[in-house]
Amino acid sequence: MVDFDVVELEEADHVEVGEQAPDFVRPLVNDEYWQNTSLSELTDDGPVLLVFHPMDGAFPSTYIWNELRDRELGEQLTVVGCSISDPYAHKRFIGERGMDYRLFSDPSAKVAREYGIDHELDGMAGIREPRPAVFLLDEERTVQYAWVASQWPEFPDYDEIESAVESHT
């Protein structure tokens, strides 16, 4: 039995396929350290799968990253995440999940706003976070694939993501 309510999110005015994704600079965290990195530094090296997720520890984040980790998409392109969690929480989350992926820290949710996917957390006035979303970007940051949640919780079609990655890498 489901022990949480499904919440319909307001319609998102997000970055679409064919549009150039906004560039940004944020701390990019791995299991040992972090450093300020721009998204364009990553796309300069090839395609990037940018995965927005709720704060670390929320069950949707755990599920999303376990699924992506198990599919080993990072062997075909760069996979990075972005959420409002701080670098310390990201470092713990990466270690607990056994992830080889890095996560951008965006506590202000400014990046999520630029991508048109931020929303106010239910019952937490003034606190915003990204809704789950996945963007496949090419070397020019042009969106090749986009999926954005319309309700909470909602999860992407992981087979669809794999197909998009295979056709664009």
Image: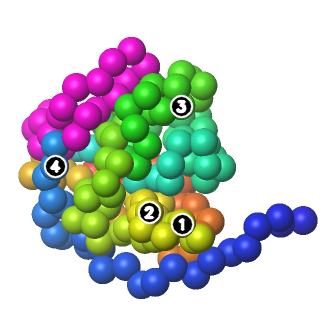
Q: Secondary structure at mark 2?
A: loop
51 is within the stretch colored magenta:
no
Q: Earlier in the sequence, mark 3 or mark 1?
A: 3
Residue 140 in the image, given as x and y percentages of width and height: 9, 52
User: Contact, CB < 8 Å: mark 1 with mark 4?
Assistant: no
What residue is shown at x 54% (from left), y 66% (from top)?
A: 124
Q: Nearer the viewer, residue 80 or 131?
A: 131
Which residue is denoted by mark 2 in the rendering? 127
User: Contact, CB < 8 Å: mark 1 with mark 2?
Assistant: yes
Q: Earlier in the sequence, mark 1 or mark 4?
A: 4
Mark 4, other Cα within 10 Å: few <14 / some 14–19 / many ≥20: some
Residue 93's tag is 3
Q: CA distance from mark 1 to mark 2?
A: 6 Å
Dot 2 amino acid type: Ile
Residue 68 in the image, given as x and y percentages of width and height: 52, 41
Quadrant position of residue 70: top right
Which residue is denoted by mark 4 in the rendering? 24
What residue is shown at x 26% (from left), y 57% (from top)?
A: 111
Mark 1, other Cα within 10 Å: few <14 / some 14–19 / many ≥20: few
Q: Is residue 106 visible?
A: yes
Residue 58 in the image, given as x and y percentages of width and height: 61, 49
Which residue is denoted by mark 1 in the rendering? 124
**In the image, 135: left or right of 1?**
left
Q: Nearer the viewer, mark 4 or mark 2?
A: 2
Dot 1 amino acid type: Met
Give the residues drawn in magenta, as a range.
26-45
Q: CA distance from mark 3 to mark 1?
A: 22 Å
